[in-house]
Amino acid sequence: MISDQLFVYGTLMRGFDHPMARLLAANADFLGEAQCRGRLYLVKHYPGLVKSNDPADIVHGELFRLRAREAMLREFDMYEACGEGFPLPTEYVREMLSVTRADGSAGEAWTYIYNWPVTSLPRIASGNFLEQ
């Protein structure tokens, strides 16, 4: 089954005064806080998530259920510049990831993985973009 859930960890989270954050809030149901395994880096004024196999590497974010999945994913693919027509390698790639909700339940959700080198980027050690 293709997930209609989206895990966000940066400027799409609630509380950001950003057109795309407002679009998400208007077209999705907030399911709660969630986390996934990964490392968070500060790219510019926004973060990038890189997958990790280390259980200590946790990224904190929010989980949403998209009401119009295909249309919304197309919008966010364009926003993250990884939709059709963008030159490869794109800065982000959309992938399914295992996420754990605050109540401990786990599931699969779409998220945007940072796809460029992170060697020169500062790491957000807390894994929480809001606390960096």
Image (tube, grey):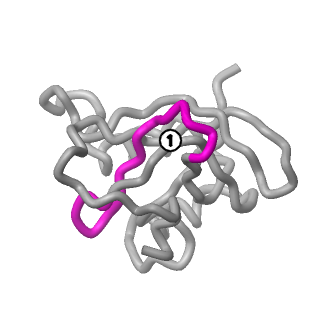
Badge 1 element: strand
Magenta region, residue range = 42-56
- The answer to which of 132 and 55 lies nearer the viewer is 55
In the rendered image, the quadrant that contains the C terminus is bottom left
- The answer to which of 61 and 6 lies nearer the viewer is 61
Viewed as shown, does residue 35 lie left or right of 116?
right
Residue that lies at the very extreme toward the top in this rendered image: 1
Which amino acid, mark 1?
Thr
Viewed as shown, does residue 57 lie left or right of 120?
right
Residue 66 drawn at (x, y percent): 63, 47
Residue 23 drawn at (x, y percent): 48, 63
- In the rendered image, residue 54 lying in the magenta stretch gets the answer yes
Write the residue at 58% across / 33% down. Answer: 97
Q: Is residue 51 above or below residue 10?
A: above
- In the rendered image, residue 59 lying in the magenta stretch gets the answer no
Residue 32 drawn at (x, y percent): 74, 61
Write the residue at 63% across / 39% down. Answer: 55
Q: Which residue is mark 1?
A: 111
Residue 111 drawn at (x, y percent): 50, 41
Viewed as shown, does residue 52 lie left or right of 28?
left
Examine the image and state in which quarter residue 81 appears. top left
Q: Is residue 6 above or below residue 29?
A: above
In the rendered image, the quadrant that contains the N terminus is top right
Write the residue at 41% across / 66% down. Answer: 11
Magenta stretch: dominant secondary structure: loop
Write the residue at 65% across / 42% down. Answer: 5
